[in-house]
Amino acid sequence: MQHYIRLGRNFPFPDYRPVYPRDPRFRISHYRLKLVFDLEARAVEGLADITVRADDGLVELDGYDLEIKNVQGPSPTYSYDGRRLLIRTLAGQEHEISVSYRARPRAGLYFILPDEKYPSRPSVIYSQGEPEYHRHWMPIYDYPNMKFTTELIVRVPGEFTVISNGDLVGKRDVGDAVEWHYRMDKPHSPYLISLVAGLLEGVEETAGDVKLLYYVPKGMKDLVRNSFSKTADMMKFFTVLTGVRYPFKTYIQVCVPEFIVGGMENTTAATLTDLTLHDDHAHLDFSSDPLIAHELAHQWFGDMVTCRDWSHIWLNESFATYLENLYLQKDKGDDEFFYELLNDLQSYLDEYHKRYSRPIVMRVYKYPEELFDRHAYPKGGLVLHSLKLMLGEEIFWRGIRQFLEKHAFNTADTEDLRKTLEAVSGRHLEWFFDQFIYSAGHPQLKLSYRWDERERLFKITVRQEQGEDSPETYDMPLEIIVNNDSETIPASIPLDRRETTVYLSLKAQPWHICVDPGLKLLREVKAEIPLEELINALQRCRYVVCRVEAARALGRMGGFRAVQALENAVLTDTFWGVSSAAAQALGEAGGSEARDALLRCLEKVRHPKVRRSIVDALRSFREDEKVGSSLSRVLSDPSESYYVRAAAASSLGSIRVTDYMRSLVENLKTPSHADVITIGCLQGLAELGTEEALKTIIDHTRLGNPNTVRIGATVALAKFPGRKEAYERLAELSRDPYDRVRQAVISAAREMLDHKLLPVLDEMAERDVNERVRRGAREVAKKIRDHLEKGVEYKVLKEELEKVRDENRRLVERISRLEGKGL
């Protein structure tokens, strides 16, 4: 086994140690919480009635910065150090203890209320517990490996609506307030407790015998349909797929402003960002379906069955990611599905190459939230895809059904899944789990081939080039499709040796080798493919994966013939994703021929997602008046989709023609979904880099602007290296009250890589309440120090910065993509 296990690189810091599951000597069976809010102080008064059995009479609860007023129960004594509440009580018998407290939370519970900067904002209070944030506003065992039933009794102003887990038992008037009472009668993990209270309005429907409720901020009810109309169909699909009915009686989805992640799968009551709500014009090229499907899938994977400790979080997140993609396949077909898998592969590879590698199951960490990354989401989803194809659909889903049924309303770990699949399939799977789940990395393959006309033999050689952070070899084969004019031949190349050669007897020389078109293997493939073969692949191959990869290769190759083929693909391919990839490749190819091709495509193509790629690709053509004129027209055209106009704004700045600055400024206030046009204009201004642009961007970072805009403006400050005003503003924003703005500071610092930001980053790494911010700050600070120590060559540093800038631009665009926990 040790042959395979690799811990990866750059993920743990030197002070990190293995983290093992907590092992409490007590069990909570029921948790009843009564709450009253102090809205002016943004505080909560609580009474927690906890039904507990303690073997040795000691109950240890988590609670950060709480004011403990009283503890009652059978002869209790207690101590509290600001982080842990230790209660000595009756041993060996189940009984109730009550904790009265007050909290003014910095995390876990958020008061989004009208204030001086946002006077018209609707009032909402919401919780967000994952991974361990509930301890900031209630005394609780804040870890996933204990499940119990819950009740919430919440007193709020009469105009408020309250949402929580389970069933609404009732509500009653208490003076000028209303008390809402919810009960969750199935045991669930503490981080899944939910509370939302505020000015909300709802829509109700049913899916079979399950009640579906959709709540949104008041005044946004008309937008419900575009976001939630497929919920019932998703629920039916997941029930058929898993063989397990939706495990609860009710499913509520509630949208809240300023949610710190994209969505959270609280049991029976998912909380979502209000950015998922969108009008018909946004619906042209924006969909809430991935977010809705992801959080619904969690009701099976994460809520009914929960990972036993955070190192196994992939059991929650990888399954939700994969089921989200499987619904896309059911809803929109195979092309969409494989295109999304390809995007997931690229997302994971970006993290692998630019940040770190680690096993999917990783016990060496400091903050649980570090594990909610692209290894847990897209990589894990792709591994499940491989596992399903290897075992076969019927056996895989039969195993998943048994896994869910066996561990229903309990916790499980990766070994539980492996053993269940082994029992159902009759196959040993240790090798698969060792190579793809317990070890970092993936196969990195170099493919070469040669046709022997005389012998009619086709020689294919695969060499594995993965480094020390990955297993040396893999037991999964690489599948290829050999295409020639007379036949299509599938072949399978074993990867159990570092280099493997196979010979195929063919009737004619192949015109294309399509590598792993079903993405059965999590892999990277490099191959020196001749121009004509790439053109043939783009024009004739029936597999989306191979056409996209051919388009990307042609973009890197460039030249007249490549540009011709790419333009043809933009205009004629049957799937928009291939057309989009071809447009992006034209931007990479560069040159006047590619520019003219893109401008012709812009005149002819109507699909908004393809148009977005076209205008994005035009950013490559600096100081080009012809390009600038076209982009300016797109930006100012209200018939274009919001996202196409946003991409046009960003590209308009990138071409560095200052004459168009006025167009960017004039469109700053253009209304759009998630303020994407404003953000695009700020990105464009940042690319121009003028004094006026810097002033405008700093103004848009200030409180009072929508936080979507403030995030985009904060990241845009990275385009002003060496500017004192930019550094000073980033330092101020590092203490911003909004988590995502502080995360944007990290993104800007990652792009700037300037030692002047080290004091800011060090303070964030030490003091920020958000674990994701702490990790990001420490990671960027280390990278800056590494560059200083190694004296990185200017050219290498510049290339790295360019990659980070592109990633930052995509990150800002993902503000409204809502990828689960905000990846």
Image (cartoon, rainbow, N blue to C red):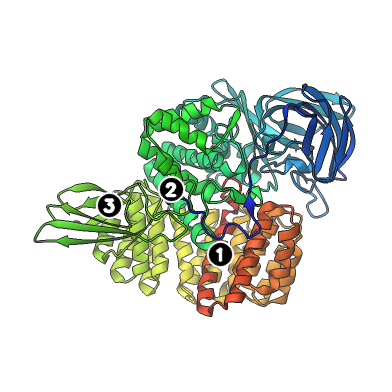
**Is residue 455 something that shows in the picture?**
yes
Given residues 146 and 669, the one toward you in this image is 146
- Please tell me whether mark 2 or mark 1 is closer to you in this view: 2
Residue 541, numbered label:
3
Q: Amino acid at mark 3?
A: Cys
Crowding at label 1, few (<14), some or many (≥20) Cα neighbours within 10 Å? many
Give percent across and percent down for residue 433: 45, 43
Label 1 sits on residue: 649
In this view of the protein, which residue sits in the foreground, 57 or 53?
Answer: 57
Mark 2 lies on residue: 435
Nearest to N terminus: mark 2 or mark 1: 2
Question: Which one is in front, 248 or 436?
Answer: 436
Compared with residue 586, is residue 272 higher up or lower down, i.e. above or below? above
Q: CA distance from mark 3 to mark 1?
A: 35 Å
766 and 598: which one is in front? Answer: 766
Q: At 75% from the left edge and 32% from the top edge, which residue is drawn?
A: 162
SS category of the residue bearing label 3:
loop
Q: Residue at x 27, y 52 (%)?
A: 541
Q: Quadrant of residue 169?
A: top right
Q: Secondary structure at mark 2?
A: helix
Q: Position of residue 692 (x, y in %)?
A: 68, 74
Q: Residues within 10 Å of mark 3 (few under 14, many from 20)?
A: many
Mark before the other along the chain sequence, 2 or 3: 2
Against 792, residue 149 (above or below) is above
Identified by mark 1, the residue type is Ala
